[in-house]
Amino acid sequence: MEILMCVAVGILFAVAVFLILSRSLLRIVLGMSILTHGVHLLLITMSRLKTGAPPLLGELAERYVDPLPQALILTSIVINFGLTAFFFVLSYRSYLKLKTDDMEEVRGRPYE
Amino acid sequence: MNNLVVFPILLPLVTGVLALLFFRRVHIQRVVSVIGLLLTAAASTVLITQVTHSGIQTLNMGGWEPPYGIVLVADMVSALLVVAASIIALACLLYAFRSVNKEREEHHFYPFFHFLIAGVNGSFLTGDLFNLFVCFELMLISSYALIVLGGTERQLRETIKYVLINIVSSALFVASIGFLYSITGTLNMADLSNRIAEVGQSGVITLIAVLFLIVFSIKAGLFLFFWLSGSYAAPPAVVTALFAGLLTKVGLYAIVRTFTLIFYHDPDFFHALIGWMAGATMVLGVIGAISYRDVNKILIYNVIAGVGFVAFGMAAASRSALEGLLFYMLHDMLIKTLLFLLGGALIAVAGTSKLENMGGLIHRYPLLGWMFFISALALAGIPPFSGFPGKLLLFEGGLQAGLYGLTGIAVLSSLLMLYSVLRIFIQAFWGEPPAGAVRRPYAVNGLLIPAGILFVFIIAMGVGAEGMFQLTSRAGDILLHPNVYIDAVLKE
């Protein structure tokens, strides 16, 4: 199971890098979102996957899942939500102002 | 256990929320902001006296004993940096009253300002790697908002790059935390240090350490500073001053903390690596500083060169280098903020940031001119100002560690830094005003009062270097002997 998840994380990272390196601003935002999701998947894989066990630190539990990575992912997801929303608004505003969503055209002006 | 440790984080957060509630009433926001920051400064001063008298202060959040819960740690290193951050924040706030327009003030300038301070103080005080990430994000999200506030074409363009770089590096940060957790099973920095000492620094841990170095270097602008010159030039002067004083230093603090506390078992490799990066940063930063003809750009490349200096101390890592590193870092925070505040005033009175369109300002603004001149001397480390003792210790430490080439680069680049800033002084303040320039008088004295606060500290740090040495040498002790920190955190 861990191997499978690692492959999935790798694919997500590759897709994200491909999207972030593209020229369209919308694709870049999506790529950034996918990148952070890949990171979340990586976090949960790092604590070993045990299907069916509850995330408890009970005293007599025979099998339990480490709860800490889940707490970390929850925090990270919330931050990612905020950032994605902010980035979308930023992209929209800059599209209105700069009249383009092509990163090649979003360069500095010579007079700066 | 000491509840005081949380106050430098809590007070700016509360102040930010209060300022958010009064967002239409700028006057109330201003009063609340000043009171909040004064309280923060007072809390951090009390904190540093407690650390001086009774050693490292810790606070286990929610009563969870380390290594399970989140722990806040105030040792001499973080306490000194928190005090410096409060001073800088206060100066920038007073400067903002005079320089930020009403529209920005009404659109939540002050709340984001305080949240940024909370994030910075949190990053300095936390003793937990994931909490460090959260504080980084708090600081970065506020900085995204501050950098784009105003929404000019240039700000939008630079913010896209700035946000993207920081999101990618934050994702890498979480990924490296995940890797480290899978190997050690803990995130508490003191406990991490113990566990890595037990299993030894294997190849995997070295790899993770390099990942952390990449992440923190992007944030600090150490070698990977390609994003910095554009984004720092976009927002108003006071925001750039705040960023120059605080943001890169938080990245540097993270490098210093992780590589003296957690990954200190393979010093040859890491110190060589950081040494190369420091050398490249100093050289490239200085080249940028002397090649531009624009006040903002020159000062921004000086920030990059300053980052190289701190990293140079980390690479040498002898006793006096680590003491000098901290002394220099405190000086660097204050002087870079001061230079950007004065540079902002200079651009405001000249109406342009281009050096060739300036000249002869000393007759009309003598106080600004001489303050700028003295700050330039302090930047380069001319005694009796604050740059001298830190640089002296850094050079001494570099020579002790046998890094002759790197020390040579550092000496040369500090001379070129002086040249680059003095050129601003010569071209803007001496000579004749350019032909055809229509000048209206500008009331600059309101901007010089907050700069004067920092100015007093610059001189006090230089003249009172003896007293500062006592503090920084205790901080150097902690950096040299990680066991002091570990024992203090895990004792109870």
Image (cartoon, coloured by chain):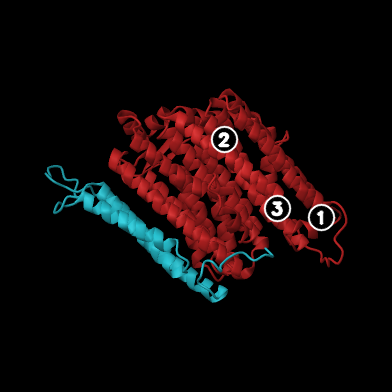
Chain colours: A cyan, B red
Q: Residues within 10 Å of mark 1 (few under 14, many from 20)?
A: some
Q: Nearer the viewer, mark 2 or mark 1?
A: 2
| Marked residue nearer the N-terminal end (1 or 3) | 3
Marks 2/3 in contact by CB < 8 Å: the verdict is no
Judged left or right of residue B149, residue A59 is left
User: Which of the two labelled residues, at mark 2 and mark 3, occupies the earlier sequence position?
Assistant: 3
**Image: A86 above or below B143:** below
The residue identified by callout 3 is B292
Q: Residue at x 81, y 64 (%)?
A: B441
Under tag 3, what secondary structure?
Answer: loop
Q: Is residue B393 left or right of residue B43?
A: right
Q: Position of residue B424 (x, y in %)?
A: 76, 50
Q: Position of residue B482 (x, y in %)?
A: 42, 30
For the residues labelled 1 and 3, the Cα–Cα distance comes to: 24 Å
When the figure is inspected, residue A58 is found, relative to residue B295, above or below; the finding is above
Mark 2 and mark 1: Cα distance apart in space: 37 Å
Q: Which residue is mark 1?
A: B365
Q: Amino acid at mark 2?
A: Phe
Residue drawn at 34 percent across, 32 percent down:
B202
SS class of the residue under badge 1?
loop
- Give the chain letter at badge 1: B
- Same chain for labels 2 and 3? Say yes or no: yes
